[in-house]
Amino acid sequence: MLSPEENELVTHVGPGTPMGQVLRRYWMPAALSEELPERDGTPVRVRLLGERLIAYRDSEGRVGLLGEACPHRQASLWLGRNEESGLRCVYHGWKFDLNGDCVDMPCETPETDFHEKVHAMAYPTVEAGGVIWAFMGPAEYQPPPPNFEWAMAPETHRYVTKTWQECNWLQALEGGVDSAHSSFLHRALGKAVPGGGLSGTGYRARSGAPKIEVRTTDWGYTYASIRPLGEEGDYVRVYHYVMPFHQIRAAQMQDSAGWRPLIAGHAWVPMDDQNCMSFNWRYHFGEEPLNDGPELLSYSGGGNEDHMSNFRKIRNIDNDWMIDRQAQKTKTFTGIEGINTQDHAVQESMGPIVDRSQEHLGSIDRAIIATRRLLLQAVKTVEDGGSPPAANDSYYRIRALERLLPAGTAWWEAMAPDLLGEREPVAAAG
């Protein structure tokens, strides 16, 4: 558990907060590239770390990210005209480029014009993996580009979505790094756990009390859930936690060619203290591309995770995630459709910010405990003038895998070369 004071420290992310200062040392997923499909198109509202921002694609195809409030009279720049490499406020015509510089002040005479003295809040951006990333920290601490392997994969080999989660970012992240829950929360009654490949054979359903092992790394930690299966050996699923809010995990997908490995994950990006945006991605590192057929839809959770135009789930806290009590008795453990929606339901049910001082943690929570320790240490590191883990390129080539190993095999020694990207991984037997 955490003390109330520690809980406050790691959950609050606004400007000037200790955790907010830590998060501002990293590139932050801000929006999907597809939200800004055309030059001089419609701006998009973005909320990051408690700040109201506006993203727009200018005449040259570059993405600007400005504070929403116009520096003149604080009108919303979302209303602005996106024209000629700048965003022009509709109130009095002040225009700003992607650096936040005011480049035109048409309501003032030449004698009273002072546009060169006015600047809007602006953050640098890069595009990688179909995502627009923002850096919101001091320029001298800007890290290398966010070149995760999935973000460098060809567009044909990756798939990225995002979903609004109505709870604090940390309880969403902790739900993601919790390996044991998949044996229960995502179980189909009388069937294998959804997911395919090794997972689809029901190993997680058959062995619901995994042993969790965590290894601290330069980027955060690597951890394994080890599930003994008697004479069959140990089912080992390995994940990476990359500071501050990324999870990378092994996955499988079935198509006409049979089972093939994927790597998948999430980034739980704080919008404010009580909301986060979950960026969901998967990619295939082989020669064949992903496709948008039924198998990919099934992998993403059953095809019942539609959202509204603002990325809020159709199945949300206001309608109790459309839980079906009859289905809970006969079909699925939860009665809630969609794997991601099942995750969101339990995380949002805790309240906007859970009180961790009331918890009773067990051995299956080792990864969660490690996450909290890393975040608390990162706060101290940044306060002391240092750089937190993964504010570098240490995570660029890491991969996540799952294997069926002989009982008692040391998983790290057996899998490390593939996990660290030193050679092409071998597909798990399915």
Image: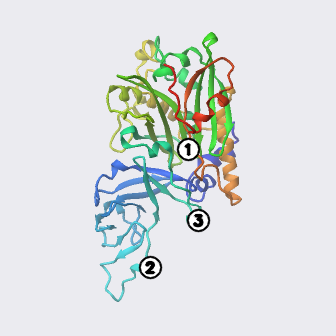
- Amino acid type shown at disc 2: Lys
Question: In terms of depth relative to the viewer, which is nearer, 270 or 394?
Answer: 394
Q: Which label sits on residue 16?
A: none
The local secondary structure at tag 1 comes to loop
If you read the primary sequence from the N terminus, does the residue marked by circle 3 or circle 1 appear first?
A: 3
Kindly indicate whether the residue at mark 2 contacts the one at mark 1 (C-beta within 8 angstroms): no
Residue hosting label 3: 140
The local secondary structure at tag 2 comes to helix
Report the Cα–Cα distance between label 3 and label 2. Answer: 23 Å
> Which image quarter is the N terminus in?
top right
Q: Position of residue 284 (x, y in %)?
A: 43, 35
If you read the primary sequence from the N terminus, does the residue marked by circle 3 or circle 2 appear first?
A: 2
> Residue at left 30%, top 52%?
37
Q: Mark 3 or mark 1, which is nearer to you?
A: 3
> Residue at left 53%, top 24%?
182
Q: Mark 1 or mark 2, which is nearer to you?
A: 1
User: Label 1: few (<14), some or many (≥20) within 10 Å?
Assistant: many
Q: Is residue 9 above or below residue 172?
A: below
- Is residue 333 something that shows in the picture? no
The residue furthest front is 423
User: In the image, 225: left or right of 310?
Assistant: right
Report the Cα–Cα distance between label 3 and label 1. Answer: 22 Å
- Is residue 152 something that shows in the picture? yes
Q: Which label sits on residue 245?
A: 1
Q: Position of residue 165 (x, y in %)?
A: 46, 40
- Amino acid type shown at disc 3: Glu
User: Label 3: few (<14), some or many (≥20) within 10 Å?
Assistant: few
- Amino acid type shown at disc 1: Phe
